[in-house]
Image: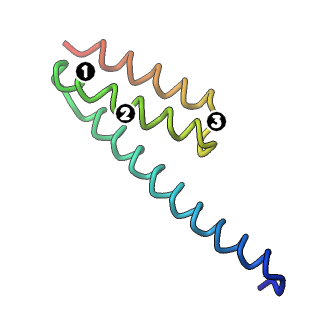
Amino acid sequence: MANHKATKKDVRQSAKRRERNRYNGKTTRNAIRDLKAVTEKAAAGKELPEVISMIDKLAKTGVIHKNKASNLKSKLTKRVNALA
């Protein structure tokens, strides 16, 4: 453990950020999983913009890379459009 005041604060801040990033990442992964499980096009189309928004927020804050976000959004959109 660090002895400097600023370093102790940095440890607290990074722990808080890590918890927030883990929570948001897990919530988004669960939303993606739930979207993939939907079989009705109307329900999936309604849910897709919310999931895309969550993915964009993760990319914006640096939790995931912007190319990964783009890749996820593309795959999800294709999957929803392919539903009958």
Q: How crowded is the residue under tag 1: few (<14 C-alpha within 10 Å), some, or many (20+)?
A: some
CA–CA distance between discs 3 and 1?
A: 25 Å
Seen as rendered, the residue at the extreme front is 5
Q: Residue at x 37, y 33 (%)?
A: 51
Residue tagged by mark 3?
65
* Left or right of 66 in this view: 4: right
* Left or right of 22 in this view: 3: right
> What amino acid is found at the position of numbered circle 2 in the picture?
Val
- Compared to 64, does 12 lie above or below? below
Mark 1 element type:
helix
Specify the label residue 45 is tagged with. Answer: 1
CA–CA distance between discs 1 and 2?
A: 10 Å
Residue 40 found in image quarter? top left
Seen as rendered, the residue at the extreme right is 4
- Compared to 61, does 70 lie above or below? above
- On the image, the x and y values in percent for residue 49 come to 34, 25
Residue 6 found in image quarter? bottom right
Q: Residue at x 43, y 37 (%)?
A: 54
Q: Earlier in the sequence, mark 3 or mark 1?
A: 1
Residue 33 found in image quarter? top left
Q: How is the image coloured?
A: rainbow
Mark 3 element type:
loop
* Left or right of 50 in this view: 25: right
CA–CA distance between discs 2 and 3?
A: 16 Å
Specify the label residue 51 is tagged with. Answer: 2
Q: How crowded is the residue under tag 2: few (<14 C-alpha within 10 Å), some, or many (20+)?
A: many
Asked whether the beta carbons under mark 1 and mark 2 sit within 8 Å of each other, the answer is no
Q: Residue at x 63, y 42 (%)?
A: 62
In the image, 30 versus 84, the foreground residue is: 30
